[in-house]
């Protein structure tokens, strides 16, 4: 997904033809970022990264910062812009932090999944920097355990390496349908299935494994 | 999620203010606000409104639902309805709390408004607690239509977590399928678990 910002009225003479087809106003990008933040917050597993949005928003932040340097200190605009910048920064850093927390918690599982994805030629969920971080983190964790286990009497246990910490994809989440969704399958433990239709805007408490795909393909969001 | 984070989300709600100063349009990332003309009402996000009010740069026009008569009607509707009534604002609790704390002088009968909002919240929360019972009794999903984010958040760690545990127990039962396992689940399906939420 390519996202570009149509410059708002500050620069009305800009030529729109130089932008890609999918163009969003800054406000829309902000909306997308909020959604991505909430989704990441409540989904048990790591979701495909939204770095296009993050970068777009950070671009806006530095753009505003640049303009602010010309504004007087006691100007009302300055304090409002500054407050908004703080809000934006909070949003972005909270989002990135949530992802890092997930990477640390499920590092081996995520690395395995990412490897499977690249083998199948699917798009990775982590961006390059995150993947790098995950690899380094995994390695130092390994190193740490190896160092510590030197003092283990007898055979060094290796069994734990096969038991990955995996996210509980059956955990319950609150979801809001962004548009009408028909035929959400709900799997019961005893292998029965139930089908539910969701109206636009309806909210539901449901097990994540039934709706994970709806979150990933952007048909609904977590709340 | 912290209540502060819910507040963060609620603060982008637009609200009408009457500025006491003049200024041209301000281009915020979240959208343009203004131009500000003294004593002409203009819509701004709630966080801007609160900030301006604190600097005594505006009067706040309370949203039309923040009115004793309308809230009384809403409270009656909430009392009589079995389901949750749709609230006039997705973040009524946050708007109420913020505006009543910084702009009580701009709201007529502010104390009464405060009490009624609290009453409505209490009615909804007790309804919520009793509906949790039905939810846990056996359905594998629950509708939470018309609940606001703050209300959903108030039952956040507990309810999903309880559902997780029930699911885990059901998984175990289906794996073993022995009668001895179902005893604990019979207990679960009775109101014992739900009554702990009351």
Image (cartoon, rainbow, N blue to C red):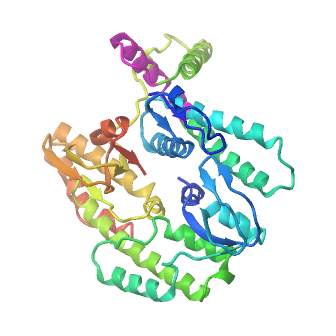
Report if residue A196 is visible in the image.
Answer: yes
Query: Furthest-front residue in view?
Result: A13
Query: Furthest-right residue in view?
Result: A73
* Side of A186 relative to A45 (left or right): left
Instruction: Return the x and y of residue B22 as percentages of the image width and height.
Output: 76, 65
Quick check: A145 above or below A204? Answer: above
Residue B62 or A214: which is nearer the viewer? B62
Q: Main secondary structure of the magenta part?
A: helix
Counting the numbered discs, the total is 0
Quick check: B35 above or below A5? Answer: below
Q: Which residues are magenta?
A: A99-125
Residue A146 or B92: which is nearer the viewer? B92
Dividing the image into 4 quarters, which one contains the C terminus of chain B? bottom left
Residue at 59% x, 89% y is B109
* Side of B187 relative to A208 (left or right): left
Instruction: Return the x and y of residue A156 as percentages of the image width and height.
Output: 50, 12
Residue at 72% x, 50% y is A81
Instruction: Return the x and y of residue B67 as percentages of the image width and height.
Output: 51, 84
Whether residue A123 is in magenta: the answer is yes
Whether residue A120 is in magenta: the answer is yes
Instruction: Return the x and y of residue A57 as percentages of the image width and height.
Output: 60, 37
Quick check: A12 above or below B4? Answer: above
Residue at 42% x, 57% y is B158
Residue B34 or A17: which is nearer the viewer? A17
Report if residue B98 is visible in the image.
Answer: no
């Amino acid at each position: 997904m390519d996202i570009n910002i149509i410059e708002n009225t500050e620069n009305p003479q800009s030529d729109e033809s130089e932008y890609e087809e999918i163009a969003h106003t800054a406000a829309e990008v902000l909306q997308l970022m909020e959604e991505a933040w909430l989704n990441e917050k409540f989904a048990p597993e790591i979701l495909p990264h939204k770095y296009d949005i993050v970068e777009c928003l950070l671009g806006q932040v530095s753009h505003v910062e640049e303009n602010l340097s010309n504004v007087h200190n006691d100007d009302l605009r300055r304090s409002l812009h500054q407050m908004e910048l703080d809000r934006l920064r909070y949003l972005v850093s909270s989002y990135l932090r949530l992802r890092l927390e997930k990477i640390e918690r499920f590092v081996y599982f995520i690395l395995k999944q990412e490897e499977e994805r690249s083998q199948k030629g699917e798009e990775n969920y982590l961006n390059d920097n995150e993947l790098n971080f995950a690899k380094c983190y995994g390695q130092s964790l390994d190193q740490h355990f190896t160092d510590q286990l030197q003092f283990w009497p007898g055979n060094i246990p290796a069994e734990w390496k096969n038991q990955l910490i995996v996210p509980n994809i059956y955990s319950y989440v609150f979801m809001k349908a962004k548009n009408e969704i028909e035929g959400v399958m709900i799997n019961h433990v005893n292998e029965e299935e139930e089908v539910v239709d969701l109206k636009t805007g309806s909210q539901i408490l449901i097990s994540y494994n039934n709706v994970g795909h709806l979150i990933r393909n952007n048909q609904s969001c977590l709340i | 999620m912290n209540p502060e984070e819910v507040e963060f989300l609620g603060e982008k709600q637009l609200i009408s203010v009457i500025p006491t100063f003049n200024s041209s349009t301000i281009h915020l990332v979240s959208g343009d606000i203004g131009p500000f003309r003294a004593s002409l009402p203009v819509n701004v996000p709630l966080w801007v409104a609160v900030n301006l009010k604190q600097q005594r740069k505006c009067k706040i026009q309370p949203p039309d639902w923040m009115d004793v008569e309308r809230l009384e009607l809403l409270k009656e509707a909430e009392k009589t309805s079995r389901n949750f009534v749709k609230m006039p604002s997705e973040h009524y609790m946050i708007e109420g709390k913020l505006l009543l704390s910084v702009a009580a002088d701009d709201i007529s009968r502010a104390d009464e408004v405060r009490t009624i909002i609290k009453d409505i919240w209490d009615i909804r929360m007790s309804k919520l607690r009793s509906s949790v019972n039905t939810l846990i009794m056996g359905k594998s999903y629950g509708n939470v239509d018309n609940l606001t984010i703050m209300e959903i958040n108030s039952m956040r760690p507990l309810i999903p977590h309880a559902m997780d545990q029930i699911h885990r127990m059901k998984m175990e039962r289906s794996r073993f399928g022995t009668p001895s396992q179902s005893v604990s689940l019979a207990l679960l399906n009775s109101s014992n678990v739900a009554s702990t939420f009351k």
